[in-house]
């Protein structure tokens, strides 16, 4: 279960939770919560759709135990964690969620995170709604997990056939909802070749880990502009840090959860033009949206 934290949206759950089953579950939890944490029994019975997308954790002594693991989660992750403790899940994801679930229990408030998981060749963006509940004896968590966005194998194959380097960036927003940082959530084969990296090593990295001077050379400011104005942009840039030496035409296009960056090597076309200093942006153009 290689899963990575991207963003905490807990301060604006009602406006940002996307999956219908999770929206319904959150409204039900809020309705039953009143002035405190609701009883688990007050949320029952759950619809089949919600039950398939949720897991239930119960605190036994010092251990959090998975007592139910939804059918959709077993199918997606290839394992049923029922009966296991959160502390027994290996690796960084296990440690992260063991700590996070305990934090939710201690805080006694709903939390929403966006997480990334790489399963086979597919890249999923998950949203995870964590809801504390009271039991007849003790405390627990109901956690809804559902896809927020994903790439099918067919789309992956089409993107990998493209000779231009394509990156999809997931937005990391500040407290005002403005784009403040970004992570790589997808990179096609050409993107890996341009950077001289395995794309598996780039996925989940902060944008500055891949493009070290992105904040200094003005590219990130253009990414922010494109996301804010919902408008695609195009510009030329020479030999930015992180990419093979060359002259590139870059297109930034906004999408629901971030932007895409397409890097086209135009070194042959630019050979007869005056050479641009490395990292300098030129020929900035505002494009019309595709639709």
Image: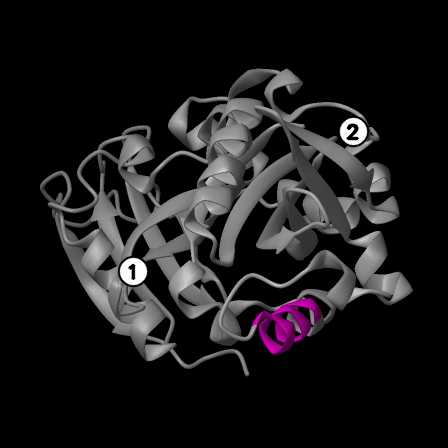
29 is within the stretch colored magenta: yes
Provide the major secondary structure of the magenta segment. Answer: helix
**Which quadrant is the N terminus positioned in?**
top right
Do we see residue 127 in this rendering?
Answer: yes
Q: Residue at x 79, y 43 (%)?
A: 73
Front-most of residues 213 and 80:
80
On screen, residue 45 versus residue 65, left or right, reads: right
Q: Is residue 182 above or below residue 80?
A: below
Tags 2 and 1 touching, CB below 8 Å = no
Q: Mark 2, residues whose alpha carbon is within 10 Å: few (<14), some, or many (≥20)?
A: many
In magenta, the rendered stretch is 25-33
Place of residue 231 in the rendered image (x, y in percent of width and height, measured from the top left): 37, 76
On screen, residue 40 versus residue 227, left or right, reads: right
Residue under circle 1?
Answer: 223
Which numbered circle lies on residue 132? none
Do we see residue 165 in this rendering?
Answer: no
On screen, residue 199 versus residue 8, left or right, reads: right
Give SS at disc 2. loop
71 is within the stretch colored magenta: no
Q: Residue at x 22, y 33 (%)?
A: 212
Give SS at disc 1. helix
Place of residue 39 in the rendered image (x, y in percent of width and height, measured from the top left): 68, 60
Q: Residue at x 78, y 53 (%)?
A: 53
Place of residue 51 in the rendered image (x, y in percent of width and height, measured from the top left): 83, 56
Which of the marked residues, 2 or 1, is nearer the chain's N terminus? 2
Residue under circle 2?
Answer: 81
Place of residue 43 in the rendered image (x, y in percent of width and height, measured from the top left): 75, 66
* Foreground tag (2 vs 1): 2
């Amino acid at each position: 279960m290689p899963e990575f934290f991207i963003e905490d949206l807990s301060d604006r759950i009602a406006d940002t939770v996307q999956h219908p089953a999770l929206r319904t579950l959150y409204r039900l939890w809020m309705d039953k919560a009143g002035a405190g944490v609701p009883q688990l029994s007050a949320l029952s019975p759950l619809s089949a759709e919600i039950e398939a997308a949720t897991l239930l954790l119960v605190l036994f002594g010092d251990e959090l135990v998975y007592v139910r693991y939804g059918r959709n989660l077993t199918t997606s992750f290839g394992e049923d964690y029922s009966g296991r403790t959160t502390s027994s899940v290996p690796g960084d994801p296990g440690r992260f969620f063991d700590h996070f679930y305990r934090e939710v229990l201690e805080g006694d408030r709903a939390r929403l995170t966006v997480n990334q998981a790489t399963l086979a060749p597919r890249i999923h963006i998950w949203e995870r709604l964590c809801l504390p509940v009271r039991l007849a004896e003790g405390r627990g968590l109901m956690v809804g997990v559902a896809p927020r966005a994903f790439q099918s194998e067919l789309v992956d194959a089409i993107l990998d056939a493209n000779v231009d380097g394509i990156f999809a960036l997931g937005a990391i927003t500040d407290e005002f909802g403005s784009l403040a940082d970004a992570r790589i959530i997808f990179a096609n084969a050409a993107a890996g070749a341009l950077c001289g990296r395995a794309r598996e090593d780039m996925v989940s990295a902060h944008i500055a880990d891949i493009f070290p001077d992105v904040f200094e050379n003005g590219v990130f400011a253009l990414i922010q502009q494109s996301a804010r104005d919902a408008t695609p942009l195009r510009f030329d840039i020479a030999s930015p840090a992180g990419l093979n030496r060359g002259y590139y035409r870059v297109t930034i296009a906004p999408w629901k959860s971030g932007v895409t960056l397409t890097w086209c090597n135009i070194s042959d076309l630019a050979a007869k033009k005056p050479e641009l200093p490395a990292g300098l942006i030129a020929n900035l153009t505002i494009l019309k949206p595709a639709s």
